[in-house]
């Protein structure tokens, strides 16, 4: 069943009525029902279009976190052929929050690294709600080094509230692992394309998003801190998260304006959760276009451009 967000209440009521009429229509030849159903569908579509045309930053946060939004494994299963998962960091353990491996993207061999949140309680627990530990980031480093060794591009799919903040992660060097992952991204000699598919939270996200091309889905978010945490720090009150979301400028539109990302990928009407197949197709097309552009650039120039890109962030004039 479709899950509705709080601000979608008006659309939810219409779609509930549409569902009821569709069931009636199957057992009736009444033309009046068909006409009423058509009018309700048109009205629901118009309301949904109007609603999503003017989402607030906080509403975008809710859409980015939607439980039915496609996750990293959904994208991998949809457009990576012959995917072979590679596990472990060769130092401590396997981290299920970060999935990675090698496969074929449109016939080309690629290394894919994604942060997986899980889609139900069992898988969320298995993947630690998309919060990686140091061994996950060290696995990502290993896979990027493998990509450089065999000269194949890297695709990363980011969807995380942030790195795991537990004592166990700190004891095993969480900060160092994230920093080293960023360094490995900068030193990788092959093209790196990142897509923020949901939530890009703090260093846990940038550890895999230090890329040549940073793409964001239209209703995804990317921020140094979550709105709830920001609200707790600034106002000692997590209930001010909506105000914090506006102040953080965490939407794809804000980030493109500040030149922190390279492209926004349009989502289906009502968000990726309403039409996952269309969202996957859009992401696939955008990744291929980015790879086509990047693979024409020599490795040394590519590395230099990537480094300059991140050094320029925050120093460029905003349009």
Image (cartoon, rainbow, N blue to C red):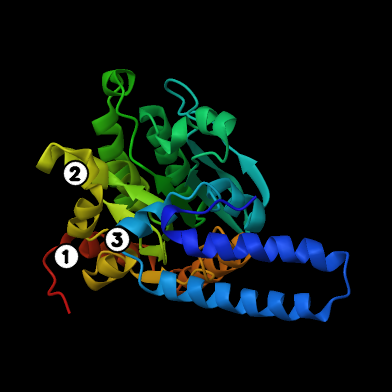
Residue 284 shown left or right of residue 140 in the figure? right
Residue where numbered disc 3 is placed = 57
Q: Secondary structure at mark 1?
A: helix
Residue 138 quadrant: top left
Identify the mark nearer the N-term, 3 or 2. Answer: 3
Residue 246 shown left or right of residue 186 in the figure? left
Residue 255 quadrant: bottom left
Quadrant where the C terminus sits is: bottom left
Nearer to us: label 1 or label 3:
3
Give the class, few, some or many, for how many residues have Cα within 10 Å of label 3's Cα (few <14, many ≥20): many
- Which mark, residue 312? 1
Give the class, few, some or many, for how many residues have Cα within 10 Å of label 2's Cα (few <14, many ≥20): many
User: Distance from label 1 to label 3 (Cα)?
Assistant: 26 Å
Residue 118 position, x and y percent, is 54, 39
Nearer to us: label 1 or label 2:
2
Query: What residue lies at 11% left-to-right and 66% top-to-bottom?
Result: 315
Name the foreground residue: 37 vs 85: 37
Identify the mark nearer the N-term, 1 or 2. Answer: 2
The answer, for residue 61, to whether it is visible in the render is: yes
User: Distance from label 1 to label 2 (Cα)?
Assistant: 25 Å
Query: What residue lies at 32% left-to-right and 41% top-to-bottom?
Result: 204
Residue 79 position, x and y percent, is 64, 58
Residue 316 position, x and y percent, is 14, 71
Residue 250 shown left or right of residue 140 in the figure? left
- Which mark, residue 230? 2
């Amino acid at each position: 069943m479709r899950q509705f967000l709080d601000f979608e209440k008006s659309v939810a009521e219409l779609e509930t009525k549409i569902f009821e009429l569709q069931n009636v229509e199957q057992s009736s030849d009444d033309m009046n029902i068909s006409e009423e159903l058509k009018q309700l569908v048109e009205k629901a579509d118009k309301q949904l279009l109007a609603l999503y045309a003017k989402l607030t930053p906080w509403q975008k946060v809710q859409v980015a976190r939607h439980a039915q939004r496609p996750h990293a494994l959904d994208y991998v299963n949809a457009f990576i052929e012959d995917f072979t998962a590679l596990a472990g960091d060769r130092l401590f353990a396997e981290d299920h929050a970060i999935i990675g491996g090698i496969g074929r993207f449109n016939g080309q061999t690629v290394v894919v690294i994604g942060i997986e949140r899980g889609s139900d309680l069992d898988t969320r627990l298995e993947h630690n709600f998309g919060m990686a530990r140091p061994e996950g980031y060290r696995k990502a480093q290993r896979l990027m080094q493998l990509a450089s060794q065999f000269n194949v591009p890297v695709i990363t799919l980011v969807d995380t509230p942030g790195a795991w903040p537990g004592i166990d992660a700190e004891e095993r060097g969480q900060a160092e692992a994230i920093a080293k992952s960023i360094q490995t991204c900068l030193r990788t000699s092959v093209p790196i394309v990142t897509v923020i598919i949901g939530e890009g939270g703090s260093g846990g996200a940038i550890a895999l998003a230090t890329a040549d091309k940073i793409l964001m889905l239209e209703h995804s978010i990317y921020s140094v801190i979550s709105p709830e945490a920001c609200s707790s720090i600034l106002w000692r009150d997590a209930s001010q998260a909506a105000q914090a979301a506006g102040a953080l400028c965490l939407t794809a539109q804000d980030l493109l304006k500040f030149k922190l990302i390279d492209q926004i990928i349009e989502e289906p009407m009502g968000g990726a959760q309403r039409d996952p197949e269309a969202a996957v197709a859009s992401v696939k097309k955008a990744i291929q276009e980015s790879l086509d552009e990047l693979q024409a650039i020599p490795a040394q120039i590519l590395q230099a451009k990537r480094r300059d890109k991140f050094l320029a962030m925050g120093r460029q004039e905003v349009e």
